[in-house]
Amino acid sequence: MYVGEQLPSLEIPVTRTLVVAGAVASRDYQDVHHDAESARQKGSPDIFMNILTTNGLVGRYITDHFGPTAELRRVAIRLGAPNYPGDTMVLTGVVERVEGDTATVRVVGENGIGRHVTGTVTVTVPPDALPQSPSGTATGGVR
């Protein structure tokens, strides 16, 4: 991992099932996350994803890239445009800082109407889990 490293993008289809299941799994029973009619009565065109589901997807994005031994130390996100069923959220990231085996990654998630999520994730990756160079040494740290 190195400053400026761009993570590959991740496309996440926003399905009605994902929105509802994410809300239920995080015990968020607000009707705007599972009842389309209630959401419309409150001014939304449809149900929308809750912040806890978004937070989990951001965490998945980071651990998918850095591997199963990566430890999320801090996740700080802000929501913007809602994620509605039928859209796709595309997550992108760039490593902003590296200190030893810990990196800070700037993450952005966009959908068809704008930026859904922005934030930073601090992640620690054990040295033995970093990619190896041809000489067999870890390639972590600032390059």
Image (cartoon, rainbow, N blue to C red):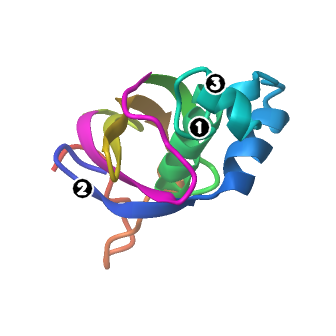
For label 3, count other residues whose C-alpha is less than 10 Å away and answer few (under 14), some (14-19) or many (20+): few
- C-alpha distance separating marks 1 and 3: 13 Å
The percent coordinates of residue 97 (x first, y second) are 24, 32
- The label on residue 41 is 3
- Magenta includes 85? yes
For label 2, count other residues whose C-alpha is less than 10 Å away and answer few (under 14), some (14-19) or many (20+): some
Element type where label 2 sits in the image:
strand
Q: Is residue 107 visible?
A: no
Pick the front one: 142 or 105: 105
Three-letter amino acid code at disc 3?
A: Gln
**Res 109 → quadrant:** top left
- Location of residue 135 with respect to 112 vertically, above or below: below
Can you identify the residue that label 2 sits on? 6
Can you identify the residue that label 1 sits on? 48
Q: Residue at x 43, y 31 (%)?
A: 121
- C-alpha distance separating marks 3 and 2: 41 Å
Q: Earlier in the sequence, mark 2 or mark 1?
A: 2
Give left or right: position of 124 versus 116.
right
Element type where label 1 sits in the image:
loop
- The label on residue 90 is none
Q: Residue at x 15, y 50 (%)?
A: 143
Three-letter amino acid code at disc 2?
A: Gln
Pick the front one: 95 or 8: 8
Which span of residues is magenta-colored?
Answer: 78-97
- Magenta includes 54? no
Q: Earlier in the sequence, mark 1 or mark 3?
A: 3
Q: Residue at x 49, y 25 (%)?
A: 75
